[in-house]
Image (cartoon, rainbow, N blue to C red):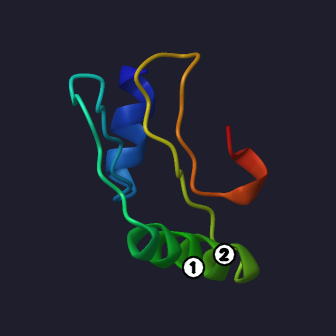
Amino acid sequence: MAGLAFACNAYGVLVLNYCDVKSIKVNPLDELFVSTCFNTCAKLNIEIIDYVICNAQTHYSFRDGYRD
């Protein structure tokens, strides 16, 4: 995990950990904006690491194909 974080940081990709956050408020407008960004990047074949890791078994994704 540490290696992944260092590798992502080298390419300017931010890996966040929100395990300690009690609640995350995301309104529909926020979700629409972020989803639009990911969809646009997907059409342009730009890869984005779009999940936030707490442990190896959990993630949250804004991409439709990876929704929980």
Residue linked to disc 1 = 36
Q: Find residue 58 and report its horizontal and vertical position in percent.
A: 54, 23
Q: Residue 32, relative to residue 48: is it above or below? A: below
Front residue of 14/31: it is 31
Q: Residues within 10 Å of mark 2 (few under 14, many from 20)?
A: some
User: In the picture provided, is 13 more to the left or to the right than 48?
Assistant: left
Front residue of 9/33: it is 33
Residue at 62%, 77% in the rendered image: 41
Secondary structure beneath dot 1 equals: helix
Pick the quarter of the image with the N terminus: top left
Q: Quadrant of residue 56?
A: top right
Q: Are marks 1 and 2 in contact (CB under 8 Å)?
A: yes
Pick the quarter of the image with the C terminus: top right
Residue at 46%, 78% in the rendered image: 33
Compute the Cα span from label 1 to label 2.
5 Å
Q: Amino acid at mark 2?
A: Asn
User: In the picture provided, is 30 more to the left or to the right than 44?
Assistant: left
Residue 46 image label: none
Residue linked to disc 2 = 39
Q: Residues within 10 Å of mark 1 (few under 14, many from 20)?
A: some
Secondary structure beneath dot 2 equals: helix
Front residue of 38/1: it is 38
Front residue of 60/5: it is 60
Q: Find residue 21 and report its horizontal and vertical position in percent.
A: 22, 30
Q: Amino acid at mark 1?
A: Thr
Q: Quadrant of residue 16?
A: top left
Residue at 29%, 51% in the rendered image: 25
In this rendering, the count of numbered labels is 2
Q: Find residue 45 and report its horizontal and vertical position in percent.
A: 72, 74
Q: Residue 19, relative to residue 7: is it above or below? A: above
Q: Find residue 55 and report its horizontal and vertical position in percent.
A: 46, 16
Residue at 47%, 70% in the rendered image: 34
